[in-house]
Image: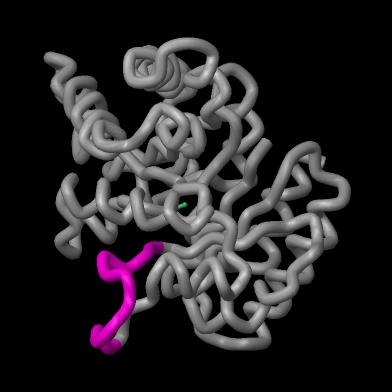
Amino acid sequence: MIIAANWKAYVEEYARAKKLVAIAKRRARDLNGSVILAPPAPFLGAFAPGNRSAIAFAAQDVSLTTGGAHTGEATAQAYAAAGATYAIVGHSERRAAGDTDAVVAEKLAHAHAHELTPILCIGERERDSEGRYLSFIREELTAALDSRSQKERARIIVAYEPIWAIGKTAADAIAATDLAEMVAYIRKVLGELLPGKGAERVPILYGGSVEPANARDLAASTGIDGFLVGHVSADPDSFAALLRQFS
Ligand code: PGA
């Protein structure tokens, strides 16, 4: 299991950040898998440098720029220098703030160029009865990976996060059968983009209202390799409870 914790902008106090890092380190030892923390940039800068623990750090996003006179931007290179080894790219909240498919593809390239493994987020806004959401997923994947080499396509994590399920409660998360169907579909599209064995090895995460109450069931029968967790990952007690589900 890969548990990636997207703190978003929920965590704003140093003491809480420190507590969450400590919980992740402690629980990672018993976990059958790995923990990746994606804190806001200042906290990544505080905890990731020199990190040799069992946990890893991810940028929540990377800049479209590659350095220079761009006040307020944090580049992939700067994140890598601070100790990040992953970068979330294409999160729906960044897409809503203006990241087009072309921007996402460029950010993916910046992440790869600096040895950050991209956690590529894809996900439909709504489910229609004609299955248009499937073509939407295909387009998002293809647009992000089209310009990448075969080697780079193999070095990604895909996070399937249906927008309609984000930021709610366990009851609003996707049904296990629907998730299993989507994971199979994503694997099929990845197989077309990445012939050979490579596609099978790309981890697929699910995100969207993952909570201690539903995580185990979602993990059991859907073929996912882990979760990208939002609000639950920003609360020390809930995050510890979630990690306990997998130890
Ligand atoms: P959520 O967020 O767990 O709060 O639904 C998931 C995400 O947006 O990554």
Give the percent coordinates (x, y) of residue 103.
Answer: 20, 54
Residue 179 versus residue 53: which sits nearer the camera? 53
Q: Would you place residue 211 above or below residue 79 in this image?
A: above
Residue displayed at 46% across by 46% down:
119
Q: Would you place residue 225 above or below residue 156 in this image?
A: above
Residue 186 versus residue 229: which sits nearer the camera? 186
Residue displayed at 14% across by 21% down:
132
Give the percent coordinates (x, y) of residue 45.
Answer: 58, 80
- Examine the residues drawn in magenta and state their main secondary structure: loop
Residue 95 figure quarter? bottom left
**Magenta-tinted stretch:** 61-71
The answer to if 68 sits in the magenta stretch is yes
Q: Would you place residue 245 above or below residue 12 in this image?
A: above
Say whether residue 183 is left or right of residue 243.
Answer: left
- Quarter of the image with the N terminus is top right
- Quarter of the image with the C terminus is top right
Residue displayed at 37% across by 65% down:
62
The answer to if 164 sits in the magenta stretch is no
Give the percent coordinates (x, y) of residue 42.
Answer: 52, 83
| Colour approach in the figure | one colour
Q: Would you place residue 195 above or below residue 124 in this image?
A: above
Give the percent coordinates (x, y) of residue 66.
Answer: 31, 70
Residue 201 versus residue 170: which sits nearer the camera? 201
> What is the total number of numbered labels drawn onto the structure image?
0
Residue displayed at 80% across by 44% down:
31
Residue 41 versus residue 151: which sits nearer the camera? 151
